[in-house]
């Protein structure tokens, strides 16, 4: 690629977020190809510039290409952006590893941990790709539908490789999209994963009609849980006070476009998990992430009462009303028993 040329981008995952990001990048003038596994979705994107399954009614840019062939998607790519759900992340990394052009770095916009192990996705990526491959995580408050509609959005890109971080941010940054940068992959990934669990908690509270005070209390004490786990895992507190933490927490806990919040709303109103998940019809990351957050909390000996309540409600071992009673019965204590910032 000549220095003056725009990087060619391969986006892997043609769900709502992969499609929205591919459309954004194509609108910025990059040669962009979107890989998806469903031929019907790929054909609709290629032929009618729409993704009727995941972003109905939104016109996608005509130059955006789509394919079901992974080798074709990765051919001559300068940058790879993975946007599949966390349960599919390791498999996609495995598949792309032998096909990746040697100079192409790999970023992802997936939010979650590796299901079953609780490993960070950057740990999975570096294991599957081997040493020396530039890696970055893209995260922050961003509903796919709004990005696809061109509404203003701010996100953050974190990487240990400053040059790759800038490259990813350059590709995303544009007239309606601000891309910030940072170098705390742990904090950024933890924030994006854990806010999904906390969004279920506020959804449940709102579904039960507990009021606005309860919602604000849950968001704030949820942020406290994020900060405590983040410190134990080696992330930096300021990362969680920014777009990757507080920003995404507020969006997902209050915005009804959130699938995790909608799951909580349905449970709080008395629906069964099966019914709620079926009606949402898209990925709901908290179903995996709640277990992994509690696994990590156990390993590090940290109490996370809200996340624990969500985990137990999702497993059906407590009802929303019992979960609320458990939280309200907790011992009174100092808001910050010790400073989180030193
Ligand atoms: N939507 C949003 O607003 C945002 C989402 N994210 C994150 O992005 C990630 C992707 O979510 P999102 O796009 O919203 O999810 P969607 O439910 O909209 O789409 C999921 C996509 O992943 C595909 N997929 C599922 N399993 C596999 C697999 N094993 N191999 C390959 N592809 C697979 C699905 O294909 P198929 O249709 O064939 O099942 C579908 O294209 C999640 O981690 C989410 O938290 C982050 C920020 C915003
Ligand atoms: O991550 C998101 C917004 O930043 C999307 O949230 P949901 O997965 O809950 O829809």
Image (cartoon, grey):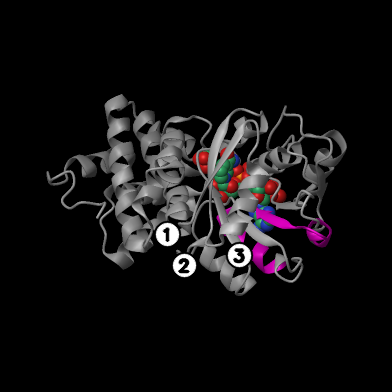
Mark 3 lies on residue: 90
* Mark nearer the N terminus (1 vs 2): 2
Gap in angstroms between the C-alphas marked 3 and 1 = 15 Å
Q: Residue at (61%, 72%) from the top-left corner? A: 132
- Please state the horizontal and vertical placement of residue 329, each as a whole percent of the image: 16, 43
Based on the displayed image, in which of its 4 quarters is residue 176 positioned?
top right
Q: Is residue 259 left or right of residue 229?
A: right
**Residue 252 or residue 116, whichever sits in front:** 252
The relative height of residue 207 versus residue 183 in the rendered view (above or below) is above
Q: Residue at x 77, y 54 (%)?
A: 3
Which residue is label 2 attached to?
117
Distance from the alpha carbon under mark 2 to that under mark 3: 12 Å
Q: Which residues are magenta?
A: 71-95
Is residue 82 rendered magenta in the image? yes
Mark 1 vs mark 2, CA separation in Å: 7 Å
Crowding near the residue tagged with mark 3, few <14, some 14–19, many ≥20 C-alpha atoms within 10 Å: some
The disc at residue 265 is: none
**Looking at the image, which residue is at 17% across and 43% down?**
335
Q: Earlier in the sequence, mark 3 or mark 1?
A: 3
Residue ID for mark 1: 292
| Residue 249 in view of the camera | yes
Task: Provide residue 94's location: percent of width, then percent of height.
Answer: 67, 69
Q: Position of residue 27 (x, y in %)?
A: 75, 36
Q: Is residue 331 left or right of residue 176?
A: left
Number of numbered callouts drawn: 3
């Amino acid at each position: 690629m000549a220095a003056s040329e725009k990087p060619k981008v391969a986006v892997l995952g043609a769900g709502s977020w992969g499609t929205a990001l591919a459309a954004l990048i194509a609108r910025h003038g990059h040669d962009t190809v979107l890989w998806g596994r469903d031929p019907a979705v790929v054909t609709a994107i290629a032929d009618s510039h729409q993704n009727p399954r995941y972003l109905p009614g939104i016109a996608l840019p005509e130059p955006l290409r789509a394919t079901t062939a992974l080798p074709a998607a990765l051919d001559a790519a300068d940058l790879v952006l993975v946007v599949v759900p966390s349960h599919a992340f390791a498999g996609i990394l495995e598949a792309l590893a032998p096909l990746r052009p040697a100079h192409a770095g790999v970023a992802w916009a997936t939010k979650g941990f590796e299901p079953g192990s609780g490993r960070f996705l950057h740990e999975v990526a570096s294991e599957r790709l081997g040493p020396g491959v530039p890696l970055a995580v893209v995260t922050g408050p961003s509903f796919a539908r709004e990005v696809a509609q061109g509404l203003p959005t701010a996100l953050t890109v974190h990487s240990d490789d400053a040059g790759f971080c800038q490259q990813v941010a350059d590709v995303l940054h544009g007239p309606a999209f601000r891309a910030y940068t940072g170098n705390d992959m742990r904090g950024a990934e933890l924030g994006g994963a854990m806010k999904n669990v906390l969004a279920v908690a506020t959804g449940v509270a709102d579904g039960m009609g507990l009021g606005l005070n309860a919602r604000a209390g849950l968001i704030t004490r949820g942020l406290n849980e994020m900060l405590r786990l983040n410190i134990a895992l080696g992330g930096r507190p300021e990362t969680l006070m920014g777009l990757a933490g507080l920003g995404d927490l507020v969006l997902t806990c209050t915005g009804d476009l959130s699938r995790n919040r909608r799951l909580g709303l349905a449970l709080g109103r008395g629906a069964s998990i099966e019914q709620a998940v079926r009606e949402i019809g898209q990925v709901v990351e908290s179903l995996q992430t709640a277990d992994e957050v509690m696994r990590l909390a156990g390993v590090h000996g940290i109490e996370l009462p809200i996340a624990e309540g969500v985990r137990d409600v999702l497993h059906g071992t407590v009802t929303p009303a019992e979960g609320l009673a458990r939280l309200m019965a907790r011992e009174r204590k100092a808001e910050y028993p010790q400073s989180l910032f030193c």
